[in-house]
């Protein structure tokens, strides 16, 4: 499912215009990213938590040549699903 399909679904379920639904989705995602950039955790009860995590510099391999290389330290956005989501996926 992409953002257009998600916006269509939300628009149909909530009696919104598709462009309004898309703006709501984009604003929500921007808020999650902004919170993660500032180090805050975003918790959506019944769905899960989004949190930025630091990844240290580490050794890796170039897949084309197999040569060793250093991968720079970075940050990633991690998602931990809530129990309800885990149960829904595993039932």
Image (cartoon, rainbow, N blue to C red):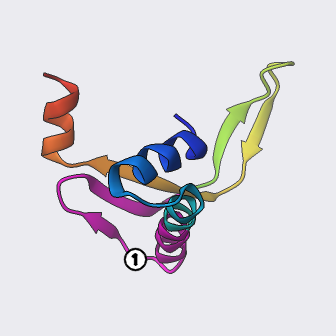
User: Closer to the camera, 52 or 90?
Assistant: 90
Using the image, determine if residue 6 lies above or below residue 90. Answer: below
Can you give x and y, in whole percent of width and height, for residue 56 in the image?
A: 57, 56
Q: Give me the residue at 38% from left, 57% from top.
A: 15
Image-based side of 90 in relation to 27, left or right: left
The residue carrying pointer 1 sits among few (fewer than 14), some (14 to 19) or many (20 or more) residues within 10 Å by Cα, namely some
Q: Give me the residue at 53% from left, 71% from top.
A: 27
User: Closer to the camera, 59 or 27?
Assistant: 27
Q: Quadrant of the C terminus?
A: top left
Q: Give the extent of the magenta segment.
A: 27-55
Q: Quadrant of residue 67?
A: top right
Can you give x and y, in whole percent of width and height, for residue 16 in the image?
A: 44, 61
Residue underneath mark 1: 40
Label 1: state its secondary structure.
loop
Q: Give me the residue at 74% from left, 44% from top.
A: 70
Q: Is residue 24 magenta?
A: no
Can you give x and y, in whole percent of width and height, for residue 87 in the image?
A: 13, 33
Q: Is residue 54 magenta?
A: yes
User: Closer to the camera, 61 or 79?
Assistant: 79
Which residue in the rendered view is the most extreme toward the bottom? Answer: 38
Can you give x and y, in whole percent of width and height, for residue 42 in the image?
A: 35, 69
Q: Quadrant of residue 84?
A: top left
């Amino acid at each position: 499912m992409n953002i257009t399909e998600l916006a269509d679904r939300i628009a149909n379920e909530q009696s919104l215009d598709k462009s309004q639904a898309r703006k709501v989705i984009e604003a929500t995602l921007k808020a999650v990213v902004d919170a993660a950039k500032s180090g805050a955790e975003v918790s959506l009860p019944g769905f899960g938590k989004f949190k930025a995590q630091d990844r240290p510099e580490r050794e890796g391999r170039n897949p084309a040549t197999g040569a060793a290389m250093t991968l720079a330290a970075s940050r990633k956005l991690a998602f931990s699903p809530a129990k309800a989501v885990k149960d829904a996926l595993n039932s």
